[in-house]
Amino acid sequence: MAGIVDFEEGWRLLATSLAKQRSIIDGSMSKSSSEDDNMQLYMYVLPSMRQINGETLLKGLVARWRNHKKIVISETRFFFYLDRYYISQKSLVPLEQLNLCSFRDQVYSELKDKITRTVVDMINDERDDKVIDRDLLKDVLDVYVQIGLGMECYEVDFENAFRESTRNYYSNKAQTLILECNGADSPEYMLKAVECLQAELERVSHYLHSSTEPKLMQDLQSELMITPVETHTEEAD
């Protein structure tokens, strides 16, 4: 009969097992790899992401977030009894919520400004007729939604910066179109303005959250100096 393992030894074995499981899910080690060597790789996830930029950073975020969610599911199952009975009885934060928040607080919080700038820059590139990875943007913006409690991260960390950039972009765009079309009252200008609105609506449908649409339309109507009535009239034509 196996002897009783004391708390310190049991906790060490448990921590080692969980660290190995996390590293396997994260892809930084195989099941046959040395635990000591590869556990350290997992600890350097954030430092490695600090060194990358652009689409590479966005892809890294999406991949790490997906792996983290797998880890959360695995550990929630591992500690099912503890989570269901002890934690609930003590009115503590559920393990799943605590684990998700840990990624937000330790990884996302440090990188969010750089990630937001990259996303906004990509959207402006698309407005200038450059081809971008829309699926990647959709995955990144889903992280903003999933990582917060409600829509706070999406609205505060992304949407505010996106709307400011949008207003600046279309303020400059309006001035250019006014010169090209001989005035904001010309039919040519109205057609161009409505085309801009339709392009932004398409962006909402592809990768922005639906809650952004009314705010975005309000910003565009203000910067392009058109009213909702004029917009509907042009669309009907």
Image (cartoon, rainbow, N blue to C red):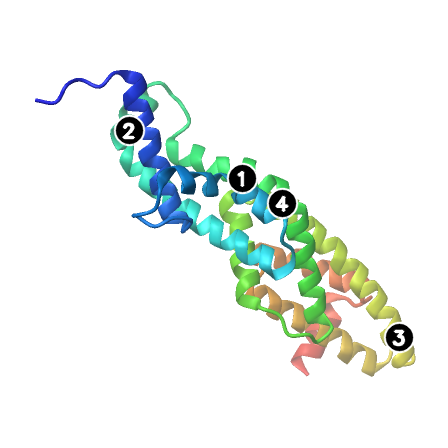
- Image coordinates of residue 128 in percent, x first then y, are 74, 73
Give the residue type at disc 1.
Arg
- The quadrant in which residue 13 appears is top left
Q: Residue at x 56, y 42 (%)?
A: 46
Image height of 30 relative to 84, above or below: below
- Between the C-alphas of marks 4 and 2, the distance is 33 Å
Give the residue type at disc 3.
Ile
Secondary-structure class at tag 4: helix
- Between the C-alphas of marks 3 and 2, the distance is 63 Å
Which residue lies under the disc numbered 3? 178
- The quadrant in which residue 56 appears is bottom right
Task: Kindly report which numbered mark, 4 or 1, lies closer to the viewer in this rendering.
Answer: 4
Taking depth in this image into account, of 201 and 143 the one nearest to the observer is 143
- Between the C-alphas of marks 4 and 3, the distance is 39 Å
Which residue lies under the disc numbered 1? 104
Which residue lies under the disc numbered 4? 111
Task: Kindly report which numbered mark, 4 or 3, lies closer to the viewer in this rendering.
Answer: 4
